[in-house]
Image: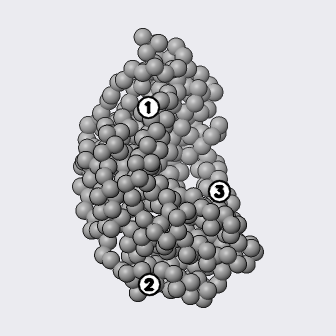
Amino acid sequence: MINFSRFSLDNGLRVIVHEDRSTPLVAMNILYDVGSKDEDPAITGLAHMFEHLMYCGSVNIPEYDLPLQLAGGENNAFTNNDITDYYLTVPAENIETGFWLESDRMLEPGLSQKKLDIQKNVVIEEFKQRYLNQPYGDAMLLLRRLAYTVHPYRWPTIGMDISHLENVTLENVMSFFALHYVTDNAILALTGNITPGRAYDLAAKWFGPIPGRASSPRSLPKEPDQNQKKNLTVEKNVPSDALYKAWHMGPRLSEDYYTLDLSTDLLAGGESGRLYNKLVREKNLFSEINAYITSDTDPGLIILSGKLMKGTDIYKAENAVNEVINELKDFALTSNELEKVKNKFESSTVLSNTSILNKALNLSIYELLGDTGLINREVESYRAVSRKMVQDAAIRYLNPENCTTLFYLSEGNK
């Protein structure tokens, strides 16, 4: 059981505190309720670029990293479709340094054209390296664009196109900050060697004076149901053919979320997964294969990806994938298989929550979802999944009409 305290400042900042005296450290996590889904389709990549800009020094603190390093701390950040998250760990006696640094850049990050130009180049190079200059790098770009028609999940966090990054202006990023980096759009979680009382005092001291501003209202287009299969075939200079599939599913808080999460573990939970056993080990059709859910706040995707063995016909491989998936629909799943993936989830959850940093992030995410107490109840939700629920979910979601398929062919195999 993870006990926590929760309070809000007058400016709308939500604060969650979990005291853990077993560690000499404190983890601080600041989650901003803004991700790539909040971008203008004509100017994508802003959320991720702004994450970079937040480390370029603020008005009062020219260099973010140095004071934290001198205090014995470490930090990092990430951006995804739904959120932008900044986190740090520091010895408990120096936690006020973290409050000072994070509150100052929330108040005024010190944006400038010079900083923007530098980070543009960094992010553009990252785009090239991650998506364009490595084998299969653009697969998710292609798959998402095909699977989604109107929802902003159709582009990746880094942006839809390099030209969007090149054309970002200082006015764009300043407007983005003003709309989204506001106190009532942020959640501060603290875990480790800190009392709720001290956390409140420091939050009130450093974040309390930041003026409250209304966050930008969110109105996203609803993705229509997919009732017809979608296929795309591309030929690229890659070592071997690859197969990618995506099925639409519900949002993070949907009733089928836990069932589908366990279902992907049943299919591709390492070497014990059905896909690996049947298609890698027994039939030698794939060299590797994986399945997972995107865990997005809004309706997301179930994704399957696999690299084929050279000489394997990709359509034969696809049929073999469908046969394994259909086994879930035919109630071929055993109680032992299901219990094994449940145990695996429970053990990974317990292990994850031994880290104060993971606990801080999880508390922030559950608070954003509207129920911080989920951190103590989600194992029960996974435990409640039955074989019948897996079968029903497979029939409902893993059907051809709901499926988008990318056939990623090697030019050398023509």
Q: Is residue 325 left or right of residue 143?
A: right
Q: Label 1 belongs to which residue? A: 132
**Quarter of the image with the C terminus in it:** top left
Number of numbered discs visible in the structure rendering: 3
Name the one closer to the observer, 312 or 408: 408
Mark 2–mark 3 contact, CB under 8 Å? no
Number of the front mark, 2 or 1: 2
Quote the CA–CA distance across marks 2 and 1.
45 Å
Which mark is on residue 292? none
Q: Label 3 belongs to which residue? A: 348
Quote the CA–CA distance across marks 1 and 3.
34 Å
Query: Is residue 126 visible in this depiction of the protein?
Result: yes
Name the one closer to the observer, 286 or 208: 208
Decide: is 159 above or below 182.
above
At label 1, the amino acid type is Leu
First in sequence, mark 2 or 3: give its number: 2
Measured as percent of width and height from the top left, residue 260 is found at 47, 51
What secondary structure is marked by label 3? helix
First in sequence, mark 2 or 1: give its number: 1
First in sequence, mark 1 or 3: give its number: 1
What secondary structure is marked by label 2? loop
What secondary structure is marked by label 1? helix
